[in-house]
Image (cartoon, rainbow, N blue to C red):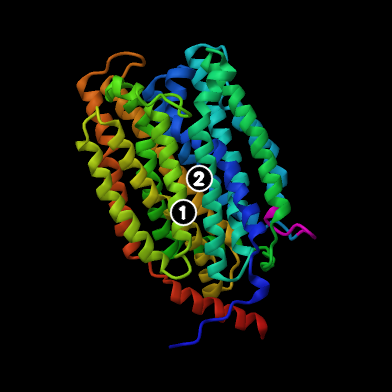
Amino acid sequence: MPNKRQVDPSQVIPFQEKFGYGLGDFASNLFWMPFILYGTYFYTDVFGISALSVGIMLLVTRVWDVVNDPVMGILADRNPQRAGLGKYRPFLFWFAVPFGLVGSVAFFTPDLSPSGKLVYAWVTYTAFGMIYTAINIPYSALMSVMSKEPSERSSTSFFRMIGAQLAGLFVSSSLMTVVALLGAGNEQRGFFLTMALFAVIAVACFILTGKMTRERITPKVKVKGELSKDLKIIVTNKPWWILFFVAFFTIAAFTIRFGVAAFYFKYYADQTAVEAWNIGFIKGGAVSAFFTLGTVFSLLGIVFMSFFVKKVDKKKMYISLITVSAFISILFYYIPNTNITTIIIAQCAFSFLTGPTAAILFAMYTDIAAYIKHQTGSDSSALVMSAGSLSQKFGWAVGGSLTGILLGLAGYQPDQVQAENVKEIMSIMMSWAPMVACLLGAVAMLIYPLSDAQMRGITDELQAREAE
């Protein structure tokens, strides 16, 4: 039996630093999750624009990210190393406050005409996407320079996802309750005040992340004329493209269901059964239970799988988790709309399995950054991580836009009894659509070429080169 590979002690990331890094995704998801869980509902039933308009806005605004995200990656990679701060941590301090301000303004409902509201929604939603990119891509790239060790990066990625899921739990369990409390019967006012409160928490968490983390790796300084080379390296990199599509399908799998869930429980599910869940600490009926308990099990899945991340190949782990998740998704189509308990149990099982997949994928992106450095000598961590942000946003856009576009085309009208074809679309988006997205993610991952064993060898070779 071969000797166990020794980890360089200087590259071990301590617990408190991993915790601090996780606070960054907690901050991001204080806004990411409200948009995923309630974004379409907010824009239609609270803000006051049509479902079709929302769907088009969510889809079209993401096209800009094809340019925006890689440009931010390029800028972050070329940010000069700053004494005591490094290359990527400064962005957390620069954009924390703008993130909070723009995010809360996006949930403000102005007293404008329908066309004025539509323009306001487009401008603020696009602005939020840009400010999210400005802070999240450098934040993602930070993980790649916190340690040379793939196992340490993988472990840190799980802390990141724990932070994200805790934010999701906080949002799913409290958002509508806080909206009702602060709004006092006015949902427009309640959403804005709630998101302003979340903004204060998010700003504090981003700043703490910047203070509690450390960049152990100093990337090479980018010289003039390297931009075209870096772009060519990324565009022609097969693992980067594969992981982009894997991440896109993964995010789409659960954002499709999340996007339609609020409508599903309001219009498709049996309302007597739904209201029976409005008990105890769970407010807002079955939809809050669906989101909250699903998030709890997603968090449990992340914690459980974190014990195996250093022992099981990430590719094999992802394929196993997402394939089983696909078959669980089919169940939603056949569960009676009166059986809310079974629907929620199925979501808990789905969340337990899909929760760890995001952590696996972000760890794989740091592997690709190391792989590119090994193959070409180029340090382009932020540009590599821009694919993670871009695929997330497109997956997010697909979930939200499909909800709005399909419901709008079917004739959805807020606060009315829905036609049978509208209800059927809601049912399909809860079941078959996420199943297809899961299977496409599994198929794409089958051709991903980098195993954990290969990455350990690449890490050793990089360290040997640096020691010469």
Q: Toward the viewer: 78 or 245?
A: 245
Left or right: where 46 falls relative to 226: left
Asked whether, in this view, residue 345 is left or right of residue 125, the answer is left
The one nearer the camera, 101 or 75, is 101
Q: Is residue 34 visible?
A: no
* Occupied quadrant, residue 442: bottom left
Amino acid at the residue labelled 2? Gln
What number is the disc on residue 302?
A: 1
Location of residue 439 in the rendering, given as x and y in whole percent from the top left corner: 28, 53
Look at the numbered disc 1 and give the secondary structure of its residue.
helix
Question: Is 344 situated left or right of 90 in this image?
Answer: left
* Image position of 224 (left or right of 264): right
Mark 2 and mark 1 in contact? Answer it, CB < 8 Å. yes
- Number of the label disc, if any, that sits on residue 165: 2
Q: Which residues, given as a range, are shown in magenta?
A: 82-89
Along the viewing direction, whichever of 466 and 104 lies nearer the viewer? 104
Q: Secondary structure at mark 2?
A: helix
